[in-house]
Amino acid sequence: MTLQTNRHGKSIGLTFLALLLWGVAALWSWNTFAADLLGFPEMAFRHALALCLLVLSVGGLLTLPWWIAHKGQA
């Protein structure tokens, strides 16, 4: 039981780290491309994190019917 809890904690930590790095990459790419070249307003870090969560949520909702249909076949 302890081994499963330890793995669960590591996966949650890696998920938060990936979300943080994805937010930094989104912030840098938006502020480099859209703000500098196209003249759009700069993005704050909280907006970059919100964008990442929105993309993950939409992707999860789009794959949910497929996951439910294939869950019983495993």
Image (cartoon, helix red, strand yellow):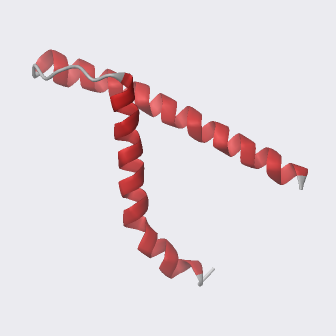
Horizontal side of 36 relative to 15 (left or right) equals left
**Which corner quadrant of the image does residue 29 belong to?**
top left
Residue 73, given in percent of the width and then of the height, sits at 59, 84
**Residue 3 vertical position relative to residue 61 in the rendered view, above or below:** above
**Which corner quadrant of the image does residue 6 belong to?**
top right
Q: State which quarter of the image contains the N terminus.
A: bottom right
Q: State which quarter of the image contains the C terminus.
A: bottom right
Residue 72, given in percent of the width and then of the height, sits at 59, 83
Horizontal side of 43 relative to 52 (left or right) equals left
Residue 11, given in percent of the width and then of the height, sits at 67, 45
**Near-viewer residue (37 or 20):** 20
Residue at screen point 66% across, 37% down: 13
Residue at screen point 43% across, 59% down: 60
Residue 43, given in percent of the width and then of the height, sits at 27, 23
**Near-viewer residue (46 or 60):** 46
Residue at screen point 36% across, 46% down: 54
